[in-house]
Amino acid sequence: MRMVVLSDSHNARKNLFEIVEMHLDDADLFIFLGDGEKDFDEILLSYPAIRYERVSGNCDWSSNYPPSKAITFNGKKVFFTHGHPYYVKHGYEMIKEHAKNIGADICLFGHTHIQYSEYCDGFSIMNPGSVRNGKYGMIDVLPSGVMLIECSL
C-alpha cells in the first residue's frame, strides 16, 4: 500500500494539484502535514473521494485540525505532525524520541522544507520537503517492509 506525503504548499496550489493528480490511481492515502490548509481544502473540493489525513502547521492560523496525529496504515503505526511542536528546525532529537516512545513504525514531519528520510532506532522517519518547491514523499508499506521515496516534480 502507498501513501503520498505532502507538506508546506504555502499557496503553491498548481504544484499540489499536479502531485495529487499524478497519484490518484496509485495512492491509498494522502497525508498533508500542514502549512497550506486552504490549498489542501481545494484538493478535497476537487477530489472528494480521496482518502486523506491531515494536521495543521504553524502558518495555518485558526485551524481546527490537530498539530499531530497517529494512525494505523497497513499494520504500521504512523505518527505525523507539521514539526514545529518538536522544534525540528533545531534538530530531530525531540521528534525521534517521541516517535520511539509511542512505538511508531513511521514518523512524518514537515516545517523545514528540506527532504530527509532515514531508518533509525527501529522506525522510518521522513520529511517530504516543501510542495512549494516541488518536493514530496511516497511511502510504500509492504509485507517485506517500509520503503521511503523522496520525490520531485
Image: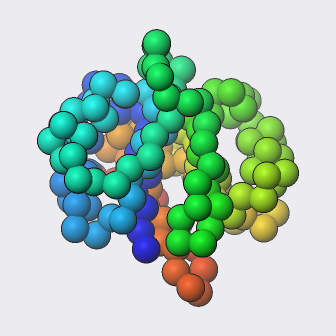
Is residue 104 or residue 127 the one in the foreground?
104
At 46% from the left and 13% from the top, the residue drawn is: 61
Is residue 114 or residue 56 the one in the foreground?
56
At 58% from the left and 61% from the top, the residue drawn is: 72
What is the residue that sits farthest to the bottom in this orientation? 144
Check the image and report above or below for 43 versus 124: above
- Left or right: residue 32 versus residue 23 is right
Spot occupied by residue 143 in the image (x, y as percentages of width and height): 56, 85
- Left or right: residue 152 versus residue 83 is left
What is the residue that sits farthest to the left in this orientation? 46
The colour scheme used to paint the residues is: rainbow
Check the image and report above or below for 18 versus 149: above
At 27% from the left and 54% from the top, the residue drawn is: 50
Give the quadrant of residue 134: top left
What is the total number of numbered labels drawn onto the structure image? 0
Spot occupied by residue 40 in the image (x, y as percentages of width and height): 31, 35
Is residue 151 or residue 53 the one in the foreground?
53
Q: Quadrant of the N terminus?
A: bottom left
At 60% from the left and 80% from the top, the residue drawn is: 145
- Left or right: residue 90 versus residue 75 is right
Spot occupied by residue 147 in the image (x, y as percentages of width and height): 54, 72
Residue 63 showing in the rendered view: yes
Give the quadrant of residue 45: top left
Spot occupied by residue 133 in the image (x, y as percentages of width and height): 35, 38
Residue 111 showing in the rendered view: no
